[in-house]
Amino acid sequence: MSESDDIRPGEIAVEAPPPDDARLRFIGRCVTPFAERKDCPRQGRLDGPECRLEIFAPWGRALDGIEAFETLDVLYWLDRSRRDLVLQSPKSDGGLRGTFSLRSPVRPNPIGLARVRLVRREGDTLVVRGLDCLNGTPLVDIKPDRCAFSVQAPPKAADRC
């Protein structure tokens, strides 16, 4: 979706200042079966289709040890999302909500986050299930699921994953 696309009734777009305060290094790309936004699942599912995280050189060695984890958090750059809506109307209910109260891909900094299940590693590529982004989406980072690093003491209710 681009900023020139129509917006739903009641949605509000703003003129955002140009981004100039961060620079990302894309470490790879997401290979998914989803060609258009309408094809993407609303939220990724751990039993969804197999997808691939292709890691660019020189970052392949950064995958060493990743096989020890069943679930990973994947951050990606939603490069085809509009970035100017402050109020949005989710398709499912027609109500209006602020962008920061939604998991919509439409955001000022379109960073996507998915918890995925690692199926296998193939060299510098991870085969995963659970992605919900378009084919070719730039990959920002991969981290083991934070629950894998939980403290030994029983967590407080607010700290549970």
Image (spheres, rainbow, N blue to C red):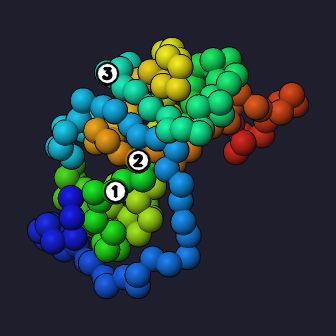
Q: Are marks 2 and 1 in contact (CB under 8 Å)?
A: yes
Residue that mark 1 sits on: 79
Tell which of 30 and 160 is nearer to you.
30
Q: Which tag, 2 or 3, sits closer to the chain's start?
A: 3
Task: Examine the rendered structure and indicate whether residue 19 appears above or below residue 45.
Answer: below
Which circle marks residue 100 in the picture?
none
Disc 3 crowd, CA 10 A, few/some/many (<14, 14-19, 20+): some
Query: x, y percentage for residue 136?
Result: 31, 42
Callout 3 secondary element: loop
Residue that mark 2 sits on: 138
Query: x, y percentage for residue 151?
Result: 83, 33
Q: Quadrant of the N terminus?
A: bottom left
Disc 2 crowd, CA 10 A, few/some/many (<14, 14-19, 20+): many
Residue 42 visible at all: no
Q: Which tag, 1 or 3, sits closer to the chain's start?
A: 3
Q: Which tag, 2 or 1, sits closer to the chain's start?
A: 1
Callout 2 secondary element: strand
Residue type marked 3: Pro
Q: CA distance from mark 1 to mark 3?
A: 22 Å
Q: CA distance from mark 2 to mark 3?
A: 19 Å
Q: Are marks 1 and 3 in contact (CB under 8 Å)?
A: no
Task: Examine the rendered structure and indicate whether residue 73 appears above or below residue 13.
Answer: above
Please give left or right for residue 62 compared with residue 4 in the image. right
Callout 1 secondary element: loop
Residue that mark 3 sits on: 49
**What's the residue at 35%, 20% (across, down)?**
50
Which of discs 1 and 3 lies nearer the camera? The answer is: 1
Residue type marked 1: Asp
**What's the residue at 41%, 81% (across, down)?**
18
Task: Examine the rendered structure and indicate whether residue 5 appears above or below residue 1.
Answer: below
Q: Quadrant of residue 45?
A: top left
Task: Examine the rendered structure and indicate whether residue 25 appears above or below residue 123.
Answer: below
